[in-house]
Amino acid sequence: MPRAEYATESEVFRDGLRALIARDRAVENWLSKDVAGAFDALKQIPRGRLGIDKVRAKLASKYRKAAAKA
Protein backbone atom coordinates (compact mmCIF):
# COMPACT_ATOMS: atom_id res chain seq x y z
CA MET A 1 0.00 0.00 0.00
CA PRO A 2 1.59 3.32 -1.03
CA ARG A 3 2.45 5.78 1.69
CA ALA A 4 2.49 9.55 1.38
CA GLU A 5 5.86 9.87 3.11
CA TYR A 6 8.89 7.62 3.15
CA ALA A 7 11.72 7.50 5.63
CA THR A 8 14.34 6.47 3.07
CA GLU A 9 14.86 6.29 -0.67
CA SER A 10 15.00 2.52 -0.30
CA GLU A 11 11.38 2.49 0.92
CA VAL A 12 10.34 4.44 -2.17
CA PHE A 13 12.02 1.95 -4.47
CA ARG A 14 10.62 -1.06 -2.61
CA ASP A 15 7.10 0.36 -2.72
CA GLY A 16 7.45 1.12 -6.42
CA LEU A 17 8.71 -2.38 -7.15
CA ARG A 18 5.84 -3.92 -5.19
CA ALA A 19 3.37 -1.86 -7.24
CA LEU A 20 5.00 -2.95 -10.50
CA ILE A 21 4.99 -6.60 -9.44
CA ALA A 22 1.31 -6.40 -8.47
CA ARG A 23 0.46 -4.82 -11.85
CA ASP A 24 2.44 -7.46 -13.72
CA ARG A 25 0.66 -10.24 -11.84
CA ALA A 26 -2.72 -8.69 -12.64
CA VAL A 27 -1.84 -8.49 -16.34
CA GLU A 28 -0.56 -12.08 -16.36
CA ASN A 29 -3.77 -13.29 -14.69
CA TRP A 30 -5.91 -11.41 -17.20
CA LEU A 31 -3.90 -12.78 -20.12
CA SER A 32 -4.04 -16.37 -18.91
CA LYS A 33 -7.70 -16.33 -17.83
CA ASP A 34 -9.42 -14.17 -20.44
CA VAL A 35 -7.23 -13.51 -23.44
CA ALA A 36 -5.70 -16.96 -23.90
CA GLY A 37 -9.11 -18.66 -23.84
CA ALA A 38 -10.59 -16.19 -26.31
CA PHE A 39 -7.60 -16.59 -28.61
CA ASP A 40 -7.81 -20.39 -28.48
CA ALA A 41 -11.54 -20.21 -29.27
CA LEU A 42 -10.85 -17.88 -32.20
CA LYS A 43 -8.30 -20.31 -33.63
CA GLN A 44 -10.96 -23.04 -33.65
CA ILE A 45 -13.31 -21.03 -35.90
CA PRO A 46 -13.25 -22.31 -39.48
CA ARG A 47 -11.78 -20.17 -42.22
CA GLY A 48 -15.24 -18.80 -42.98
CA ARG A 49 -14.90 -16.02 -40.41
CA LEU A 50 -16.06 -12.60 -41.50
CA GLY A 51 -13.72 -9.90 -42.70
CA ILE A 52 -14.17 -6.27 -41.67
CA ASP A 53 -16.00 -5.40 -44.90
CA LYS A 54 -18.57 -8.15 -44.37
CA VAL A 55 -19.06 -7.12 -40.75
CA ARG A 56 -19.63 -3.50 -41.76
CA ALA A 57 -22.09 -4.54 -44.47
CA LYS A 58 -24.05 -6.72 -42.03
CA LEU A 59 -24.18 -3.93 -39.45
CA ALA A 60 -25.28 -1.41 -42.07
CA SER A 61 -28.03 -3.76 -43.21
CA LYS A 62 -29.27 -4.28 -39.66
CA TYR A 63 -29.17 -0.53 -39.06
CA ARG A 64 -31.21 0.17 -42.20
CA LYS A 65 -33.80 -2.43 -41.19
CA ALA A 66 -34.08 -1.01 -37.68
CA ALA A 67 -34.34 2.55 -39.02
CA ALA A 68 -37.07 1.51 -41.46
CA LYS A 69 -39.14 0.05 -38.60
CA ALA A 70 -38.82 3.23 -36.52
Image (cartoon, rainbow, N blue to C red):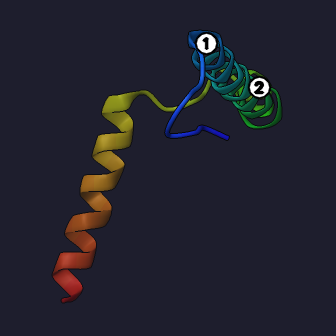
Query: Crowdedness of circle 2 by 10 Å Cα count: few (<14), some, many (20+)?
Result: few
In the image, residue 66 lies at what x, y percent?
A: 26, 77
Residue 38 shows in this picture: no
Answer left or right for 45 relative to 55: right
> Considering depth in this image, is 41 or 15 the residue closer to the camera?
15
Residue corresponding to mark 2:
25
Q: Amino acid at mark 1?
A: Phe
Identify the residue at image location x=57%, y=30%: 49
- Name, please, the residue furthest toward the bottom: 70
Identify the residue at image location x=64%, y=10%: 10
In the image, residue 69 above or below residue 11: below
Answer left or right for 47 relative to 5: right
In the image, residue 14 lies at what x, y percent?
A: 69, 16
Q: Name the quadrant containing residue 13.
A: top right
- Counting residues from the start of the chain, the first of labels 2 and 1 encountered is 1
Identify the residue at image location x=80%, y=32%: 37
CA distance separating discs 2 and 1: 18 Å
> Considering depth in this image, is 35 or 17 the residue closer to the camera?
17
In the image, residue 10 above or below residue 27: above
Q: Which image quarter is the C terminus in?
A: bottom left
Q: Nearer the viewer, mark 2 or mark 1?
A: 1
Residue 51 shows in this picture: yes
Q: Amino acid at mark 2?
A: Arg
Residue corresponding to mark 1:
13
